[in-house]
Amino acid sequence: MLEPKSFAGGLHPPEMKLTSDKAIKNLPLPDRVVLHVSQHIGAPAKPSHKITDKVSCGEVVAEAGGYVSAPIHATISGSVIAVGNFMHPFGVPSPAIVIERDPAVAEPPFTSENGLELSVAEIKKRIQDSGMVGLGGATFPTHVKLSPPDTKPIDTVILNGVECEPALTSDHRLMLEETDKVINGLQLIMKALNAKNGIIGVENNKPDAIKALDDKLKALPNITVQPLKVKYPQGGEKQLIYACLGREIPSGSLPMDVGVVVQNVASAAAIADAVNMKRPLLERIVTLAGNCVANPGNYRVRIGTTVCDFIEMTGGLKKDVPLKKVIMGGPMMGFALFDLHIPIIKGTSGVLCWDSEEAAQPHETSCLRCGSCIRACPMGLMPQKMKQLIDHRKWDKVDEIGMLDCIECGCCAYACPSALPLVQSFKLGKKNVMAERKKAPANKG
Amino acid sequence: MNTTTAALNTPAHGLLVTSSPHIYSGLTAARVMWDVNIALVPALAMAIYNFGARAALVVLASVLGAVLAEFLIQKFLMHKPVCVSDGSAVVTGILLAFCVPAALPIWVAFVGGFIAIALGKQVYGGLGQNIFNPAHVARALLLGSWPVYMTTWLKPGAAMSTGAAITDAMTCATPLGIIKTAGRDAELVKQLSESGTSLVSYVFSQLQIGFSDLFWGINFSGSLGEMSKAALLLGGLYLLIRGHITWHGPVAMCATVFVGALIFGGTLEYAAFHLLTGGLIIGAFFMITDMVTSPMTGCGQLIFGFGCGALTLLIRMKGGYPEGVCYSILIMNSLVPLIDKFTMPRKFGQVKAKEAQA
Amino acid sequence: MNPIQQLTKGFWKDNPIFVIGLGLCPALAVSSSLSNAVGMGIAATFVLIGSNMMISLLRHLVPSKIRIPVYIVIIATFVTIIDKMIAAYSPALSASLGIFIPLIVVNCIILGRAEAFANKNGVFDSLLDAIGMGIGFTIALCCIAFFRELLGEGKLFGHAMPFFSKDPALIMIMAPGGFIVFGLLIALKRLMASKGGN
Amino acid sequence: MNDMLRMGSFLFIIAAVAGVLLGFTEMKTSPRILENRLKQLEQARAEVLPEAKKFNDIKSENPNEGLLYTAGFAENGDLAGIVVNVAPKGYAGPIEMVLGLKTDGSIAGVKILSQKETPGLGTKLADNVFLAPFKKLLQDKQKPVFKVKQDGGDVDGITAATISSRAFCVGVTEALGTFEKVREQLPTLTAPTALPAVPQSGDAK
Amino acid sequence: MGAELIAIFIVAIFIENVVLSQILGLCPFIGVSSKIDSATGMGFAVIFVLLLASVVTWSIQNFVLVPLQLEYLQTISFILIIASLVQFVEMVVRKTAPALYQSLGVFLPLITTNCAVLGISLINIKRGYNLVEAVANAAGAGIGFFFALLIMAGIRERLDICEIPESMKGAPIAFITAGLLATAFMGFSGLV
Amino acid sequence: MQILTAVLVLGILGFVFGAVLSFASKKFEVKVDPKIEQTIELLPGANCGGCGYPGCAGFAEAVVNKGVATTLCPVMAAENRKKIEELLGLNKIDKPDMKPVVKAALVKCNGLDTDEYKKFEYMGVPNCQAAVLLQNGPWLCPHRCMGLGSCVAACPFDAIKIGPHHLPEVDEDKCVACGKCVLACPKQLIEMVDKEKTVHVKCNSTDRGAETRKVCKVGCIGCGLCVKVCAYDAIKVADNLARIEYEKCVGCGACVVKCPQKTIIMETRPDFKGRVAVIDEEACIGCTICFKVCKFSAVNGGTPKEKHSIIPGKCVGCGLCAEKCPKKCIKMIDKA
Ligand SMILES: Cc1cc2nc3c(=O)[nH]c(=O)nc-3n(C[C@H](O)[C@H](O)[C@H](O)COP(=O)(O)O)c2cc1C
Ligand SMILES: Cc1cc2nc3c(=O)[nH]c(=O)nc-3n(C[C@H](O)[C@H](O)[C@H](O)COP(=O)(O)O)c2cc1C
Ligand SMILES: Cc1cc2nc3c(=O)[nH]c(=O)nc-3n(C[C@H](O)[C@H](O)[C@H](O)COP(=O)(O)O)c2cc1C
Ligand SMILES: Cc1cc2nc3c(=O)[nH]c(=O)nc-3n(C[C@H](O)[C@H](O)[C@H](O)CO)c2cc1C
Ligand code: SF4
Ligand code: SF4
Ligand code: SF4
Ligand code: SF4
Ligand code: FES
């Protein structure tokens, strides 16, 4: 079972993984954190503190806004200095709590116990209380994912250690350095879901990680490592499940419909901490890379640290290389920032600081109908046609040809020789298609 | 919030903000087009070898016409940015020149290049929007307009400069022309079958050539660029390696013609003859692979290639014209929207969704 | 609308071919030479005048349910008359216009005018409308024929034109030429209209 | 029922009036049309067989075959020659032509009636470009070989329209063949007394 | 005999395509070619009406007009018959087969004033076809129309979402495309 | 004889077809929506296909059921078109000139477009919604008009254009208040306002004044000065944004002058500097009405029979006094 597996479509952008040998470094605590109340999919959390309130690290500062939501914890000890609108990484000013660190207050200690001995209910409760959301980028509240309806039994849990995005290496380092924690996390998830099998999917370009995991897994027959072909977006949930198990998630369905739950490896490690130590989600590993940074690498950083503080703590930018583009996330799916006074949130996996050469933007021309996008699309869609239909505002027709199946992976736009803004169009298209569907629910059936 | 480094203090709008993805394959439309031009160089060299400066002149006139049309229309009619430099008009010009005889009057070549871009491309809104292959649109219109010029084939080596009048001694028939006339001449066919010579060997004996001449493209006549199969295959291979074309169309078209000729003509010789004559190879590698006017998926391109091949053979064997590549491509071009409609790629998760419903 | 406008609207502004876009077959099929175009134009104008006036006269009598068959009969009568006249007095024209004369019957312009205009207006106005539309039809045909004959045969009304007659583009007098010239002319007309509008 | 009658009779009246008009038109124009058609036919015949003044259509015994040829008689009732219609297959369809043959089997004249050749190319068959040299050939040579020069004959083909030219030669040869076939009957023919009936347009086929 | 019929049929479809070569039936060709669905319906309806009309007009010509020496009433009687017949069929279909009506019947009235129908009927008579030949010709013409319409509809659906220059949108580009299509169909000339 | 057979044959054909058709139309009658039937009656019946529908009946159905524009029919007589539109109650949209449209679109943003108000240069799909999806658009102010013309694209009447400063301009003559642009705008910047109203708050920002000021020079900061100056109680501030109640607004322009941000504008007169009341002393009879009516104590007097005068610094130019003066001796004149 060791031959690399894959899926149809996709492509292989340059890997740019220059930081894969940089061990994870713990950064000092920031002086100030900005904690946005919406760092996850679902209802925003509700702030529970006022200005000047003292908070200690790990204390809840905003409670979950519903079932599909997650609480926000203070990630440093200190006092609340502002509750109001601050720039969110998505570019919209939105409610956040700002805490200034009080160096006098020490971090509370966390004690460890064996989570695997806890009841399923307790595991889930601890995960829910810890504010866990998926760290793979989608930031879906984990406790929801771990509570599928009884009608949909889960037989397999797949850990997503693919890290197919170019330039990012945080999951890679994590699998190497905290192999045990990752595996422990997987076991906890499997226990919570009563799943028999566990698979850790890793791309073939991380042989050291595969080996490290393999070594530890010898004792655990129900968990295997699945090497995967190096191809973007191997880490896409649907692609990963198809590659590992050959199961195809029907259009419009969720992994649980085929008996699978996918979690990122970092999520698994964080789950292990949450369950074993009752430690809330306080920090995450972020890859810092790009020509402009002085010390690229992988850093464990408190959530809420602003990007400029983060960069500063790692040693700042190179003096002589002008900054052109800052991307939060990976080059394929991340989003460009216009301002660096923006905090790192739970879903931030990387920060790329690019100079003008890296950020070179090709000139948009008209579509050649070359079909590169179709060949590249891992979802079997017709990006070219979708773009045309969106440009002509034919929402019903794009819906018909599968607008909502697009995972915004960016393969099409990467491959397009005409540099058409395909992904942006599709974001627009999806939004309108959903609005149209809402308008005419009768047509859906 | 205080900033810590001066570098972080770049003015807000100094940072580039675009939608994801932030990296690109580096391939651009212009790059593709200039690669096609490069791939056409071997054939151009062979054309010049065969027809001397005359070939270069015809190519130049056609390219000039195409580029001029592109420039004038974009600049003065559409008021759009001029993108002559993307090289697509040059491709059209060269390919048009490649499917006309070397003796074509220079002004006709120029007019051809002009209408290729004007009527074949710009009326539809320019690059990427056209339905029909612009070069072939022009060729078909030229053929309909000036059939005499378009079927006067210069003998290779019969050096012809601009002004010289064409004499009968300088012209000769093409292999496909001979086989067509011979096939129509019932008496000749009877004679040949009595004497046991095949039509193909009759053609070869008439022209005193063999298969290797056909392959290398020497000692017989034909359109400028279509003669040397070797040069064209070289160019085609380059495009395949560069990933600008896929194997589907060319293979489907060549295979259809070959197998069809084998079935309906009976002999391997006949099949090979059809494979190596006329514009089949240039059509299969350079024209039906034009991404703008062919189906987008591999499956669609197979159908497209099959259709082109079948129609080519039909016209060659039964139709009025000796050569059918141009018309078959135009006819199949018109069917591309329908082919595209019926060869949509399978969506990931699509079939399962139906099963799930059922 | 005064009588002059009534007459001239069809010439260019509401040209039945270029603007309304009906009755295209004869417009394209017989526009390969100017003399054919004029012949066809005259024939159609005759039918238009006859049928428009007749229908306008009968407009209060015809039961509305069978008005279309009645129109058809009336139109067909005039068509046959002109067909026979041309055959009798200009056999050459008759030969080159072929079946397109009888096909005037189904020409949508004639039926359209009958319904849209003659059915609602008095005899005099209908007459003006018919003449105007007929002339507009003729003008359109001549426009197309001008380019086709000049480019395709190098001639105008059968007379060779210098420069053009040396190497005419034969395709222009064949079917594709008709389509292409017509398409370009409509585009040109639109371009002019939009320029004028601004 | 009432409605039906009303509608029916209205249409009846309209159609009847149309009938009157049309019948009248027909009465007025039909003689002229007939005359035109006759003239055309006469003209063609007169052109290809100038000596003949009266014609007699000879039909085959087999009714399916239709017209075989037309015999032409001079003013004095002597046989002047025959007129043959042939339609060889040209480049884009049949080329309908008439030939006049004198009693000695020599060609008196040729005329192309209809053709579908490429305008400006194959259509030159009907022009002086092609016909003038052909007529000259008939005068100059006693026994010309009716083949295109490329094929070893005497006829000047049209450049780049050899197919049409060949078809023309095929037509000439065919007409000569017809003449050979009917040669014996010729002396038995007599001049008609009245004008022949005008053939319907469909008969040309 | 058979070969000749097939030749008539093939010629009518490809070489003398009603729309692209004979230039008949342009109004519906331009009017109903913007969507593939309606083009299909229209195409079938035209095939049907052409067959019906050619049979009926041939019979009228040969059994009524010729014996009575009323050939000059050809035009008027043909069009009257075609129009009435089509209308009649439309009413019957509408009543008896509503489903068929929805997909085909709705196009019937449109065909009355389609000059292809009258044109083909007249050509049948002019060329002196017998009944079977007339039917073969009509069938070929109908199928040829159907093909041309379908191709055009496909193209126009694509053009609909392309960036056509403003002044070319709609009719102009449709005609130019038809012209290029006609050029392409010239490739069939000489076939058979 | 000839003519007689012709008459007979044609007459019989005519009779038979007339009769058969009218018979068939009864026998095979199919019930259809009477509206469709009436529409068919009004259509030309030429069945030419010019409309792109399968004949007149098909077109009628499309017109009635799908609201297709009647203008698609190239041959229909104008009065029939009118009749159909009346029949279907359609004429509101298709005929802008039929019904006096009192409202027109108003774009509530007047943001500047210099670099200092931009977050970044926008590149990508030229569509406002798409721009919003990319870091909430290129402008610092989260409420600013994207200026990419989604409203322009949505307008079926060509009534909006993007003006020189990345802001849409509405042509009130063309606008029929169909509301398409309102739906298209991702920032909810467009509102339908009576055409004769000329004073507008050109801002939609609900952010606090301090924040607004950082990102816009002409944005509403919710200071409330306009509320105080309005003699007609026609302007309210809520959520840090001034809103005009148009039923009450008389367009005096007092708020325009007062607004410190120049957010409130007088549409027809960009150079409006405000007005003052001037009392024609000759005609004034000292009735004290103006004195009583002025909300800003800008009228001297109060004693009956004594001629009034205006205190220049206090008059805001609301025009209340001029309106109320029984002698009509107060005039509002423009400040230079
Ligand atoms: C195109 C695409 C690529 C992705 N690549 C990765 C990846 O490389 N690694 C990863 O952990 N998640 C990746 N994801 C996210 C996964 O689909 C999935 O959301 C995640 O693995 C679920 O785990 P989580 O809930 O713990 O985040 C990708 C998603 C998409 C749409
Ligand atoms: C509205 C919504 C509901 C979801 N419900 C579930 C769920 O019930 N169970 C589950 O395992 N995942 C659920 N998911 C999470 C998805 O399976 C997936 O992990 C998430 O969309 C991120 O994956 P991606 O990064 O590949 O997009 C849900 C996601 C959304 C958006
Ligand atoms: C558009 C077109 C039309 C043609 N029309 C004719 C024609 O009408 N008559 C003809 O004999 N050949 C016609 N040809 C055939 C060519 O001219 C052909 O090369 C020629 O007949 C061969 O004869 P050659 O031996 O003189 O070259 C046509 C060719 C083309 C491309
Ligand atoms: C592989 C390839 C083949 C091409 N073939 C043609 C061709 O046959 N004719 C042509 O006019 N342009 C051709 N082009 C150029 C270009 O695509 C063409 O001008 C577009 O059709 C114009 O929209 C080709 C381009 C490529 C990349
Ligand atoms: S972004 Fe959407 S359309 Fe493009 S390749 Fe990815 S899934 Fe396909
Ligand atoms: S990759 Fe780009 S140019 Fe090629 S078909 Fe897709 S959208 Fe068009
Ligand atoms: S879309 Fe409607 S409301 Fe908006 S400007 Fe245009 S006409 Fe006015
Ligand atoms: S008003 Fe709205 S839709 Fe119009 S340009 Fe501004 S943001 Fe876009
Ligand atoms: S004129 Fe031929 S269909 Fe209208």
Image (cartoon, rainbow, N blue to C red):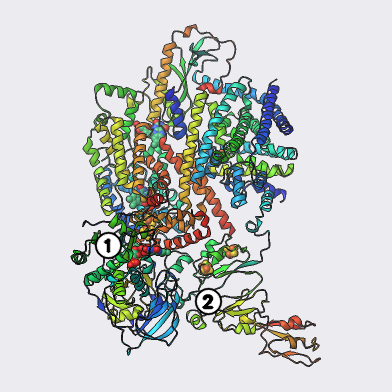
Mark 1: amino acid: Gly
Q: Eyeballing the image, is A365 above or below B15?
A: above
Mark 2: amino acid: Ser
Please give the residue where the numbered disc 2 appears in the rendered image: F205
- The answer to whether B230 appears left or right of E7 in the picture is left
Look at 58% across and 27% down and name the residue there.
Answer: E57
Please give the residue where the numbered disc 1 appears in the rendered image: A198
The chain ID associated with circle 1 is A
Q: Quadrant of ligand 5?
A: bottom left
Question: Residue lying farthest top?
Answer: D188
- Relative to the observer, which residue lies in front, C125 or B274? B274
Local secondary structure at mark 2: loop
Look at 74% across and 88% down and name the residue there.
Answer: F291
- Relative to the observer, which residue lies in front, A84 or D152? A84
Viewport quadrant of the N terminus of chain A: bottom left
Quadrant of the image occupied by residue E79: top right
Mark 1 near mark 2, Cβ–Cβ under 8 Å?
no
Look at the image and tell me whether residue B20 can be seen.
Answer: no
C-alpha gap between disc 1 and disc 2: 52 Å
